[in-house]
Amino acid sequence: MYKAFYNLKRNPFEITPDPSFLYSTKRHNEALASLYYGVRRRKGFVVLTGEVGTGKTLLVRCLLQILQRADVAYAYVFNSRLNPVEFLQYIAGDFRLQTSGKSKSELLLELGSYVIARSQRNLTTVLIVDEAHHLSVDVLEEIRLLTNLETPQAKLLQILLIGQPELDEKLDADNLRQLKQRIALRSNLGPLELDEVGGYIHRRLQLAGNDRPDVIFPIETILEVHRHCRGYPRLINTICENGLIHAYAKQSRSVTPEIIEEIANDFRLNVVRRSVKEGSEEERFEEVQRAARTLLDLYSYLRETQSETSDFPLTRTGKHEPFI
Ligand SMILES: Nc1ncnc2c1ncn2[C@@H]1O[C@H](COP(=O)(O)OP(=O)(O)O)[C@@H](O)[C@H]1O
Ligand SMILES: [Mg+2]
């Protein structure tokens, strides 16, 4: 609704992870490079962790775009609340193998033969599990068995586990130490620094078609956004999207710091700030999670009421090449 007013061709702050919006911070670059390098150099087992809304799924989608161009077959699991058989069925199905009526050991055999046959043709095969912090110990044990698919020279199946920091804790468990020992590369995503928050907001506005992002979001406003979102990209999107809606309602050419303050009050983000000073680490984290949930609920509601939503394009758009 505000697009024409701000000279925008598309919504700049969609919450869906769209690779064409990638803003390359040092950490995002390093993490994407680690995933890509792990796959191309057949390192076997790679782990990426990061708090909610830091850009993990976005990086996975960037990686998938790159892999689609190479001769790489991948299975992408994003519902990680599966039991071991469902998990193996899902992967085999993604590799277009026959799964119906097969037992767990038959599925493992089938997957094993597929991976070996591909590696004999020198082709790379990848398993990507997003939201991997939800995986049960039983499924992690299946993954450990899959890491056994190797020759003395190379790992035959490349496995990428992506999840929230609880994933690290899970992998620290004594009964999973064998799996932990197999991790070849690890990376972590954190919140953005202040200058990155500014760059991130302006880049999104530019990619959405506006060539004067500093007018819509001047530096004072960015300082205010940073103060409230504390560098988490998903929160930045939600705050900025609401900023545009509020500013448009006031027919203001700029989103002002006062508007951001208003949004922060509406969303009770100040509650987070107070507890940051006073609360324990755990309380602070819970508070941030509550604020994030509130924002996301509101965001979903706003999206439903907007008519101009567009589907996320998983295929290559050709508009922006993610780089390594
Ligand atoms: N480096 C980045 N460049 C552009 N957008 C980003 C970046 N990091 C995160 N985002 C955006 O933030 C939101 C949350 O990212 P997402 O990948 O879903 O987070 P996670 O999977 O870590 O919870 C998405 O809209 C995503 O596009
Ligand atoms: Mg995610």
Image: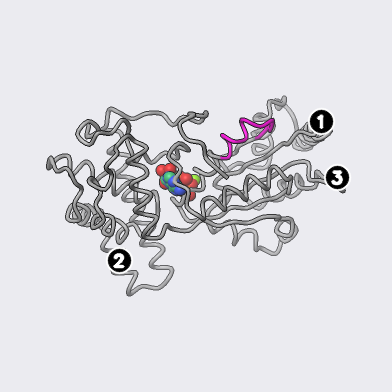
Q: Nearer the viewer, residue 158 or 163?
A: 158
Q: Which mark is residue 151?
A: 3
Q: Which residues are magenta?
A: 63-74
**Ligand 2 is within 8 Å of the C-beta of the residue at disc 3:** no
The residue under the point 27% across, 42% down is 212
Query: Does 311 sit left or right of 84 as displayed?
Result: left
Is 44 included in the stretch rendered in magenta?
no
Percent of width and height locating residue 300: 33, 40
Within 10 Å of disc 2 (Cα), the crowding (few <14, some 14-19, many 20+) is some
Tell me which label, 1 or 2, sits earlier in the chain. Answer: 1
* Residue contact between numbered discs 3 and 1, judged by CB atoms under 8 Å: no
| Disc 2: which residue | 273
Q: Which residue shows up at 18% across the image and 52% down it?
A: 256
Mark 1 sits near ligand 2, with its Cβ under 8 Å away = no
Label 3 residue SS: loop
User: Considering only order in the chain, which callout, 1 or 3, is on the residue closer to the N terminus?
Assistant: 1
Q: Please tell me how many numbered marks the rendered image carries.
A: 3
Neighbourhood count class around disc 1 (C-alpha, 10 Å): few under 14, some 14–19, many 20 upward? few
In the depicted structure, whether residue 312 falls above or below residue 156: above
Most foreground residue, 179 or 25: 25
Determine the residue located farthest toward the right in the rendered image.
Answer: 152
Q: Residue 75, how many percent across, how many down?
A: 64, 35
Report the amino acid beneath label 2.
Answer: Arg
Q: Mark 2 or mark 3, which is nearer the start of the sequence?
A: 3
The kind of secondary structure element at disc 2 is: helix
